[in-house]
Amino acid sequence: MPIQILPAMLANQIAAGEVVERPASVVKELVENSLDAGADKIEIEVERGGHKRILIRDNGSGISQHELVLALSRHATSKISSLDDLEQIMSMGFRGEALASISSVSRLTLTSRTAGQEAAWQAYAEGRDMQVQIQPAAHPVGTSVDVQDLFFNTPARRKFLRAEKTEFTHIDEWLRRIALARYDVQFSLRHNGKTVRRYPKINQPDDQRKRVAAILGATFASDALDINSHYESMQLQGYLHANRSGELDVQYFYVNGRVMRDKLIHHAVRQATAEMYGDNHQLAYVMYLRLPPQEVDINVHPAKHEVRFHQARQVHDFIYRAIIDMLQQESCLNSEPAAR
Ligand code: ADP
Ligand code: MG
């Protein structure tokens, strides 16, 4: 075969392979877009585990009529315009790939209205031919993205969809992760017409524990110790519960608002708690690390599950120290000898 440039549609579908693994990844990308648009109310509606439909509605800033079609194009983003921006990034998105990818493997309707517009507009893109049509619609300020028949035109991907229940569990789990990070936003999740989750907006930062309780249970929220520490430009906040008989086995770690699994960080936490509780203990935590955006590289993986720290050792030691200090303080306060 001669070398040829792939048609845009096929290129989008190939890219979709990296970003859109399953319904939960669609929810992730769309909710992140809503958060980037400044929404404080996000509704998620799912039918049949997302196989049939995923609808996200937000009250964010909206997309103007003349940008609707552009928003669906690949590498079209309002979030960065230079390499410098990329190194300073605070938004969840920046690749300009999610809408193009999702619309290439589904039947997608994007409806939006900005505050400056009298009426809303709607764009519809259907899979392979990507004929984007726009028409007037009724919608309050904000955006709705309606994704139907995911992978209808990519049977190989469709085969990998699991049972509705399994896919829904992934969506629910993903929502827990984002809702733990963004207690300043109200989320609701409906499945097959029934409201399954409702996380009200928390107005006072001090009430953050209420969101933690709603998601991880009242027991964890009341038993967990507070972490609050900073060193130079790094700040660590969160909740940790470690003991020999804990039942909850969850570890959530956020870097600048993004959830991630990072061996280095888990190692630092585990090493610190082992000093207090020995090698055999249960560990549950939710922690939020903040550091200047130029200290981390988030452009490592298309779905942004990983980051790279420029000063990995420093980050590790800071977390280790923060937890040791907190545990030591706690054991002094309790005046009980530390269990060893
Ligand atoms: P990215 O988020 O990486 O910029 P996307 O393909 O996810 O790329 O979105 C493309 C663009 O469409 C965004 O940069 C943003 O300007 C706009 N957009 C997408 N979703 C929303 C939304 N819910 N509200 C407002 N604007 C949005
Ligand atoms: Mg995005």
Image (cartoon, rainbow, N blue to C red):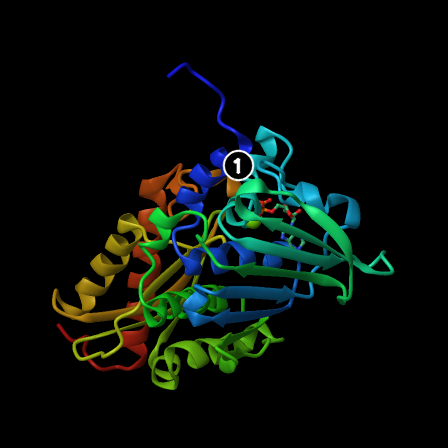
- Quick one: 24 or 203, which is closer to the camera? 24
Q: Quadrant of the C terminus?
A: bottom left
Residue 335 picture location, percent across and down = 26, 81
The answer to whether residue 116 of the structure is visible from this angle is yes
Which residue lies under the disc numbered 1?
9
Q: What residue type is labelled 1?
A: Met
Say how many tags the image has. Answer: 1
Residue sitting at x 59%, y 61% = 146
Q: Residue furthest top?
A: 2
**Is 188 situated left or right of 69 in this image?**
left
- Quick one: 259 or 169, which is closer to the camera? 169
**Is 264 situated left or right of 141 in this image?**
left
Q: Quadrant of residue 331?
A: bottom left
The answer to whether residue 303 of the structure is visible from this angle is no
Q: In which quarter of the image is residue 57?
A: bottom right
Picture layout, residue 317 above or below residue 165:
above
Q: Quadrant of the N terminus?
A: top left
Q: How crowded is mark 1: few (under 14 residues within 10 Å), some or many (20 or more)?
A: many
Q: Note whether ligand 1 is within 8 Å of mark 1.
A: no
Q: Is mark 1 on a helix, strand or loop?
A: helix
- Quick one: 187 or 276, which is closer to the camera? 187
Q: Quadrant of residue 112?
A: bottom right
Picture layout, residue 48 above or below residue 79:
below
Picture layout, residue 247 above or below residue 51:
below
Residue 225 picture location, percent across and down = 36, 74
Residue 296 picture location, percent across and down = 45, 41
Residue 9 picture location, percent across and down = 53, 36
